[in-house]
Image (cartoon, rainbow, N blue to C red):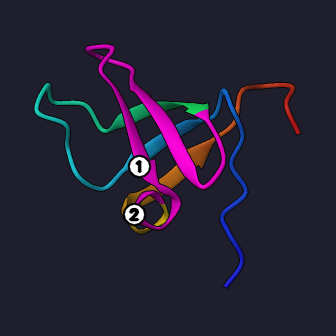
């Protein structure tokens, strides 16, 4: 199975809700681990790519980005 195409600046909508009440995260780092920043409270986390892809619901790319 190929990895989900994700890049820095994308917005990831995750399945599990964050304790602050948000599902939306900004991607801050891409590699074997994915860096995420909560768009509501600013909390930063790192997830292994496998765990990120399992919890991912949808990726939203900024306008003008391929």
In the rendered picture of this protein, how many numbered marks are placed on residues? Answer: 2
Residue 39 falls left or right of residue 17: right
Q: Which residues are magenta?
A: 29-52
Q: CA distance from mark 1 to mark 2?
A: 6 Å
Assess whether residue 3 is covered by the magenta stretch.
no
Q: Which circle marks residue 51 in the picture?
A: 2
The residue drawn where x is 15% and y is 30% is 21
Residue 65 falls left or right of residue 8: right
Name the residue carrying label 1: 47
Helix, strand or loop at mark 1: strand
In this rendering, is residue 45 above or below 48? above
Rendered location of residue 41, percent (x, y): 26, 14
Residue 44 falls left or right of residue 7: left
Question: Dividing the image into 4 quarters, which one contains the C terminus?
Answer: top right
The residue drawn where x is 69% and y is 36% is 61
Assess whether residue 47 is covered by the magenta stretch.
yes
Helix, strand or loop at mark 2: helix
Question: Dividing the image into 4 quarters, which one contains the N terminus?
Answer: bottom right
Please tell me which residue lies in front, 13 or 35. 35
Rendered location of residue 40, percent (x, y): 30, 17
The residue drawn where x is 33% and y is 14% is 42
Question: Marks 1 and 2: CB-CB under 8 Å?
Answer: yes
Q: Could you say which quadrant of the image residue 29 lies in?
A: top right
């Amino acid at each position: 199975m190929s990895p989900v195409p994700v890049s820095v600046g994308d917005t990831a909508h995750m399945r599990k809700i964050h304790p602050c009440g948000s599902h939306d995260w900004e991607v801050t780092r891409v590699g074997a681990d994915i860096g995420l920043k909560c768009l509501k409270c600013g909390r930063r986390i790192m997830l292994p790519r496998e765990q990120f892809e399992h919890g991912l619901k949808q990726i939203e790319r900024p306008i003008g980005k391929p």
